[in-house]
Image (tube, rainbow, N blue to C red):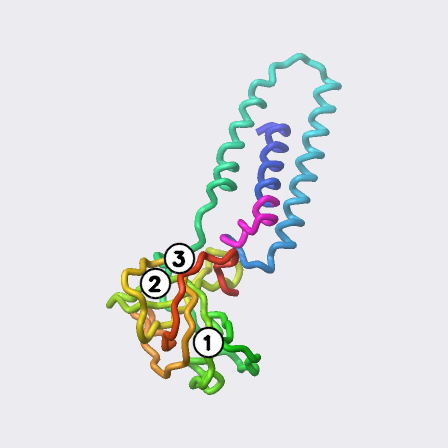
Amino acid sequence: MNRETQGIVTGLVGGAVLYAALTDTYLRYVKAGLRPLLILTAVLLLATAAVTLWQEYRSHRKENDGHDHGGSRLSWLLVAPVLALVVAAPPALGSYTADRAGTALQRPTGFADLPAGDPLPMRVMDYAARAAFDGGRSLEGRRIELTGFLSYGRAGTPYLTRMTLNCCAADAQPIKVGLAGTVPAGLKADTWLRVTGTYTAHVAKDDINGGPIPSIEVVEVHRVGAPPQQYEN
């Protein structure tokens, strides 16, 4: 690979990273807090590509040896896979992964006071932790609003699920909350729902790793679109 090709490839990668960071596509790969680092990385890659191509251009002008640079033109074929990554980015991980991984719910070090709100919007992982490890003390008497995608246990039990990230999609793991009460029939896995409900003490064991899966008593269910940030951190 000559320097011109190196510059082109570097520029394409930098452009793809910048596009992903500025359009929220990056949220399918890494957690939200990494956006500034991605933008910085993209800028550095683009600057490196520009310097490399400028130096190569000046070198060719000085040499003026009349060589055919058809090989360099072929390097533009590398645009295709980069464009495919940007235009047809893979979807965020969903029920397929959740159905094959045990819950990642862990006992937190403590629980802060919950704010006012009726219903109170909460992250799935926060509700699950309080329901499983705090005996629901902070949840009693509150209407809670959770948003997640639908997944099913081996026995067909419906779960409201969110994937959690420590860093990137490669380490994504599910947090599951059982849906007790009346749930609309015929909903397909990966359907995004906004569930309003109340705390229930029922806690099941995950079929895969035996981890706790708390439940919420469903009051209302609404289908919603997938949020831009589908992972919880």
Question: Residue 168 colored magenta?
Answer: no
* Residue marked by disc 3: 94
- Seen from the viewer's position, the closer of residues 80 and 197 is 197
| Res. 212 in view | no
Q: Is residue 100 above or below residue 29?
A: below
- Image coordinates for residue 230, horizontal then vertical, percent: 48, 59
Residue 92 place in picture, x, y as percent: 45, 54
Q: Quadrant of residue 62?
A: top right
The magenta stretch is 18-28
Q: Tell me if label 3 and label 2 are in contact, CB under 8 Å.
A: yes
Res 158 quadrant in image: bottom left
Q: Is residue 53 above or below residue 127?
A: above
Q: Is residue 87 left or right of residue 151?
A: right
What residue is drawn where x is 45% and y is 66%? 147
Task: Determine which of the numbered discs, if any, sits on residue 151 in the image.
Answer: 2
Sequence-earlier tag: 3 or 1: 3
Q: Is residue 12 visible?
A: yes
Cα separation between marks 2 and 1: 20 Å
Point out the tag, 3 or 2, that comes first from the N-terminus. 3
Separation of marks 3 and 2 at Cα, in angstroms:
8 Å
**Residue 91, which numbered label?**
none
Q: What type is the residue that disc 3 sits on?
A: Gly
Disc 3, disc 1: CB below 8 Å? no
Query: Pointer 1: what residue?
Result: 144
